[in-house]
Amino acid sequence: MRAVLRWLAIAAGGLFAATALAAGLLFHAFDAPGPMAGPSIIVVPKGLGVSAIADLMARNGVIRRAYVLEAGVRLTGNATALRAGEYEIPGNASTRDVMEILRSGKTLVRKLTAPEGTTSAQVLNLVTVAYGLDGPVGPIPDEGSLLPDTYHYSWGDPRHVIVARMGNAMSVAVANLWRERAPGLPIGSPHDAVILASIVEKETGKPDERARIAGVFYNRLRRGMPLQSDPTVAYGRALAESLPDRVLGRALTRRDLETPGPYNTYTQRGLPPGPICNPGREALAAVLHPEATEALYFVADGSGGHAFARTLAEHNRNVARWRRLRDAARDAPQSEAPARPAPETEAP
């Protein structure tokens, strides 16, 4: 009997020692540096269990052995703590590091930028092709209802939620800027401000000109003069031609300028019926805090900006100068051509 007990004790001791050795080897492998030399981005889909996640990591070379991750996760009590998402795993991350990253839920943050002056259709195109977003994008929102900005998102976020965030951001920005507007502006509502800001946004790419161009348009509105803005005509023609992104994509013709329509600010006085793009915060601020100016006209100056004038005679001289620069640039050899001037935006 004593011999049997002695052999049982020896066997139990051997089993304990073997178990301890196995556990030691497992946790050594669990904490050893991983095989990746540099960082890697891995997407863990929703609904995967521990075994499937371990296999995914091993297949992508993040860890050496799937069973080490699976066993380590279970032994540390984290079998239900791993979260789906897109993760950036650093180079040489140990299997334990991988577990902690997946447990933290700190997914990779991506960026989507909607530039100032894009139409709502163009913004939806950007959201549609943005990597990692999920689900339908929804119908095209009203023009001018989305705030151009950079938005952060994670893999799997719904597309319609990003669009809603853009809409909420525009509502907040317009409301805040409208409350702080300069007194005496000849517009009656925040919607009017968005319409005029969208025109200013398309008229100039120079930040220091926005408030002055807004001042010119206000001068024309107060005098009952048509705004005569080429971008509004181009937008109206894009709508009339049912262009999907609402961008004309060609130069305006004389016929375009002479064809009546709600967005033709050569034939219609006052503001057009709606915005022609999504203006940014700076354009909105410029419209609500315009520069005091006596100018009634502006035209491209050939350097990317505009020449402003108080009288039609002065404006006609600026137009003639611009046309000479345009023609010289058109006729010059390609290697000697000056920088291409901005599109003509005169308000005769």
Image: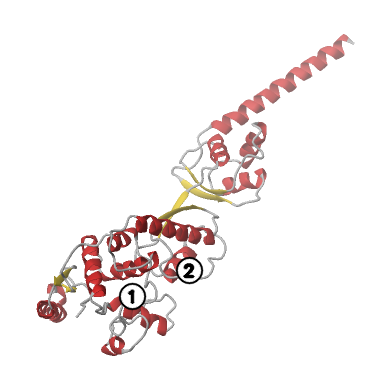
Q: Position of residue 121 (x, y in %)?
A: 44, 71
Is 60 situated above or below 300? above
The residue at 40%/76% (across/down) is: 246
What's the amino acid at mark 2? Pro
Q: Nearer the viewer, residue 116 or 216?
A: 216
Q: Nearer the viewer, residue 294 or 112?
A: 294
Is 348 situated above or below 281? below
Circle 2 is placed at which residue position?
A: 141
Q: Which image quadrant for residue 148?
A: bottom left
Indicate left or right for 201 with 82 as reference: left
What's the amino acid at mark 1? Leu
Secondary structure state at the residue bearing disc 1: loop
Q: Which mark is residue 271?
A: 1
The residue most toward the front is 184
Q: Nearer the viewer, residue 290 or 101?
A: 290
Is 255 situated above or below 327? below
Q: Pointer 1: residues within 10 angstroms few (<14), some, or many (20+)?
A: many
Q: Pointer 2: residues within 10 angstroms few (<14), some, or many (20+)?
A: some
Q: Which image quadrant for residue 249?
A: bottom left
**Which quadrant of the rendered structure holds the N terminus?**
top right
Residue 249 visible in the snapshot: no
The residue at 50%/35% (across/down) is: 33
> In front: mark 1 or mark 2?
1
Q: Which image quadrant for residue 214?
A: bottom left
Secondary structure state at the residue bearing disc 2: loop
Q: Nearer the viewer, residue 293 or 316?
A: 293
The residue at 58%/33% (across/down) is: 30
Is 182 situated above or below 108? below
Q: Position of residue 117 (x, y in %)?
A: 34, 67
- Look at the numbered discs 1 and 2 and tell me whether their residues touch, using CB distance below 8 Å: no
**Which quadrant of the rendered structure holds the C terminus?**
bottom left
Indicate left or right for 190 with 333 as reference: right
